[in-house]
Amino acid sequence: MKFASEFRDPALVRTITLNLRKACRGRWKLMEFCGTHTVAIFRYGLRSLLPENLILVSGPGCPVCVTPKAELDRAIYLSGLDSSVIATYGDLVKVPGSEMSLAEKRARGADVRVVYSSYDAVALAERLPDKRVFFVAIGFETTAPSTAAAVIRAEALGLRNFFVLSLHKRTPPVLEALLKRGTSVEGFVCPGHVSAIIGAAPFEPVASHWRRPCVVSGFEPSDVLQALLMLVRQLEDGRSEVEVEYARGVPYHGNRNALKLMDQVFTVTASEWRGLGEVEASGLRLREAFSPFDASAFIDRDIVSLPDPPGCRCGDVLRGDISPSECALFRKNCTPENPVGPCMVSSEGSCATHYLYGDR
Amino acid sequence: MCLAIPALIVEKHGNLAKASIGAVLREISLELIDRPADVGDYVLLHAGFAIHKIEKEEAEETLRIMREVLE
């Protein structure tokens, strides 16, 4: 068992597709929250297998896409400080800030490095004692524990030149924010690897209070189709529960070890989301005890951010209100080579995915 | 960004391990894992950290459910 190819078996996919067609009698609109799911759905052409009466929309589950320009501008500001080295994940460097992206800053001489792991950023700080390494930490709960581990390691090593700009965000509060705003989405494919950390239980209010079924899904084609089948069956039966399709990846109550570390280093705070505004309890910032590692301390002035370029509808796309092709800029002024908004930059952005694979 | 892939542990020294992802070998950290993993075990690997040990029985149970044909 390799835990991958078995779940890509065409015969298995066919069985689930037939089951889904049989089960889906009503007309249902579902959302896949997670950008990694969006990519899987398009890469495997899963939309073309769905019954006509099952509508699937992409949600705000792309960390780079939901990071507002003001937060990007803070990272870009740090890159201009003396002896500054920016370490971050590849997806972030190309996203345009108010004036330019981190990649453009690098082209003008800033030291901006892409890391694979948070520990690579710590190692960089060890290797460059005369520099200040700013780790721009982006990602949902899947990634936040690894940032926490990096802070703990930097402390254990006695590093005084390693700092974290936390752009981390939490998923359950934003699902609820989406519901509070009002959405026509009737059920959610919930993120599998976020849930590997937080478990499935945090989605319970979505199912019980908001009456939207939730199914935590894996990322292989059979996983996503099976999760859709489970959602459809709940809707057809009039049930609204939290179910886990991705049993091999998700303990219902999460990864206690990772949650503990995350809680040791971070405290929950309000956070700004592109397209959704400020969402209570949806962000993570370093606790007081770890303030020596907080990069925010270096941002000692107000940074004025420019509004999004006219016509950019990333916010509407992130809420699932429109499909990328409904944005007037899509494919015309906005392409992966010349992106206007972040949804076209990130490899997991809805717009980039629709651009690469076509609308269906 | 929330991509995690199954990786096979081939060497282990405390919380450090070497894992194979297809033909690629990588150093990974076991500090965030939820249950103890050893050489020969598969883990979900995200950004250099094993975040979950995969159990064969759980995967097999899912495959069994998936193969059921609805009436």
Image: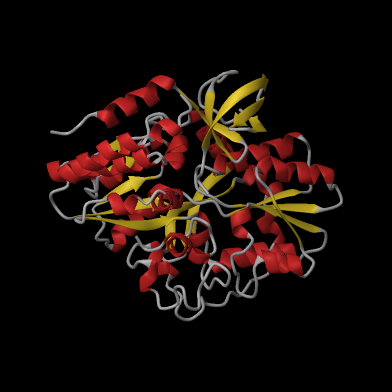
User: Residue A145: which quarter of the image?
Assistant: top right
Question: Given the current orientation, which residue lies at the most extreme right position?
Answer: A130
Is residue A244 visible in the rendered structure shown here? no
Q: Nearer the viewer, residue A315 or A132?
A: A315
Say whether residue A153 is left or right of residue A34. right
A71 shown above or below B25: below
* Residue A251, horizontal then vertical, whole percent: 41, 29
Q: Is residue A296 above or below residue B50?
A: below
Residue A5 position by quadrant: top left
In this picture, residue A324 sits left or right of residue A182 = right
What colour scheme was applied to this rendering of the protein? Answer: secondary structure
Percent position of residue A43, x then y = 43, 51
Image coords of residue B64 (percent x, y): 29, 25
- Left or right of A332, for residue A222: left
**Quadrant the C terminus of chain A occupies:** bottom left
State the residue in front, A350 or B13. A350
Residue at (67% x, 64% y) in the render: A102
Q: A74 left or right of A277? A: right
Q: Quadrant of residue B27?
A: top right
Q: Is residue A113 visible?
A: yes
Residue A256 percent coordinates (x, y): 48, 29
For the image shown, how many numbered marks are present on the structure? Answer: 0
Residue under the image location 60 percent in, 58 percent down: A92
Residue at image position (20%, 39%) is A19
